[in-house]
Image (cartoon, rainbow, N blue to C red):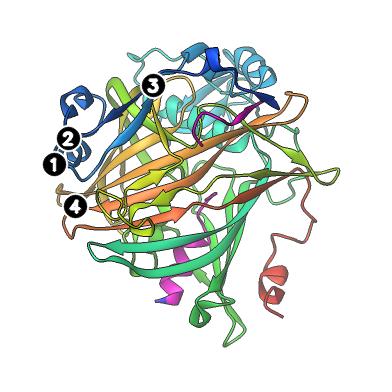
Amino acid sequence: MQSHFWSRIGRVLPVIGLAVLLGGQAVRAEDQPKTWTLDSNNWQLGKDLLPEVVLNRVKNGEYYYKVVEIDPEKFKQNYSKKFWEASEANAGKYDIDAPTCGLKDVKTGKMPDFYFGYPFPTIDPKDPQAACKMAWNFTAANQMGNGQGATFTLNGIDSSGEFKRIKLFLHINSFLGRSAGPIPNPENLRDTSLSTALEPQDVDGFGGLGKRINDWTSQDESWLYVPATRRVRRVNAATRSDPVAGLDIFGDDVNCYAGKVEYYKWKLIGEGKVLAPVLSPYPLPQKKVTETRSEVDIPYFKGAYETPGAKGAPWLIVENMSMIPRPVWILEGQSEDPYYNFGKVIMYMDKDMYRIYWKLVHNRAGEYFYNAMCAYHWSKSADGTFTTVTPNMVVGVNDKTNRAAIGGRYSSQFIETHFDDDYFTLHHLTHMSD
């Protein structure tokens, strides 16, 4: 079980209400957006705003949501001016390698060594490569935060409440798409990750290291460290589609997709609106703690199972989550890897922010069985020049077994622009539990 857990988490890229601070300033009463509650009494208002399997749980009283109406233009400023300007400047610089869905520099015909901002600031939905371009914009938004890290939990939940809890940390570092600019990249990586289990005792010290090569065809490189044997072994990247530690959550659930863009065949199948789960529609303040590191304090997403007297499904988030209506592209992704357990995956991706908020997962026989809700927060530096978006919760629900798992929900994160050169290495992995 433990090795299965770490073969997923080692490759995973990083895992408020209205009285929050906006850029260090209190939100004025007149600026507070309109809010309302979607529940079983008015569930019809959620039609075409939620996947049908989720809306059905609203209809029968298992789910209810606080909906926050926001100014779409104001929401776009959750990304920095620098990011938007870089995105506009990227127009015409990049294309798609059709056989692989890889990003291609128009001048060289190869994968770029670095980019910042959306590679494709405008996308024609009629373009045969539209879905691949959207997936690359999604990746670019993931990478703008440079390096990040947090300690969090995975909680398995059924109708009786929590049945399993695992505590771990995950640290990541991006080489492409960084707001802070390029850094030395001798291994030609897109990003790398390091993770370690902290609780319970039987998994304490298990660690994972993952590296994503910056090319169109290679598989991710992943290693598992087992402290009892003090040995490291390679693990298969396709295990991102296996359950993590027997829970109803998967390695590919962070950001609602954690694999290489090239792993999926992407197809644009529609567009619409959804209710997007967020900690706050406004950025949280970053606090500078060293020359290279900032920290962000984050209110906790509290579940019904943790709240005496709370109504709804045990895994329903009942505190600090808001739903904001957002325009989305509806994409289908499907892997051709025979070891990848998912069939088609339907994803709802923000048209402006390129966040995936919901996904519906089918098995390889084509049968739907699972959905994931992916929540985010934005944060901003004191001078407003640097912003980033971070996944901070996934709620995975297996509709076949009526069980769920919640991942994330950390109370703080750090943002790091310069990790030590030997941090994301096998040597460090094997010595973390010394």
Q: Is residue 273 above or below residue 337?
A: above
Q: Which residue is mark 2?
A: 40
Residue drawn at x 33%, y 28% as measured from the top left: 275
Q: Tag 3 or tag 4, which sits nearer the N-term?
A: 3
Residue drawn at x 75%, y 33% as measured from the top left: 180
- Dot label at residue 60: 1
- Dot label at residue 399: 4
Secondary structure at numbered mark 1: loop
Q: Amino acid at mark 3?
A: Ala
Q: Tag 3 or tag 1, which sits nearer the N-term?
A: 1
Asked if the residues shown at circle 2 and circle 1 are in contact, with their CB atoms under 8 angstroms apart, the answer is yes
- Magenta-colored stretch includes residue 16: yes
Q: Amino acid at mark 1?
A: Asn
Residue 34: where, in percent of width, then height? 41, 18
Q: Amino acid at mark 2?
A: Ser
Q: CA distance from mark 4 to mark 2?
A: 19 Å
Q: Which residue is mark 3?
A: 130
Q: Which residue is at the front of the view, 338 or 203?
A: 203
Q: CA distance from mark 4 to mark 1?
A: 14 Å
Q: CA distance from mark 4 to mark 3?
A: 31 Å
Residue 129: where, in percent of width, then height? 38, 23
Q: Which residue is at the front of the view, 172 or 285?
A: 285
Query: Which span of residues is magenta-colored?
Result: 2-23
Image quarter in which the C terminus is found: bottom right
Q: Tag 1 or tag 4, which sits nearer the N-term?
A: 1
Label 3: how many Cα within 10 Å (few below 14, some 14–19, many 20+): many
Secondary structure at numbered mark 3: helix
Look at the image and tell me whether residue 347 can be seen.
Answer: no
Q: Is residue 378 above or below residue 79?
A: below
Q: Which of pointers 3 and 2 indicates the residue nearer the eye?
A: 2
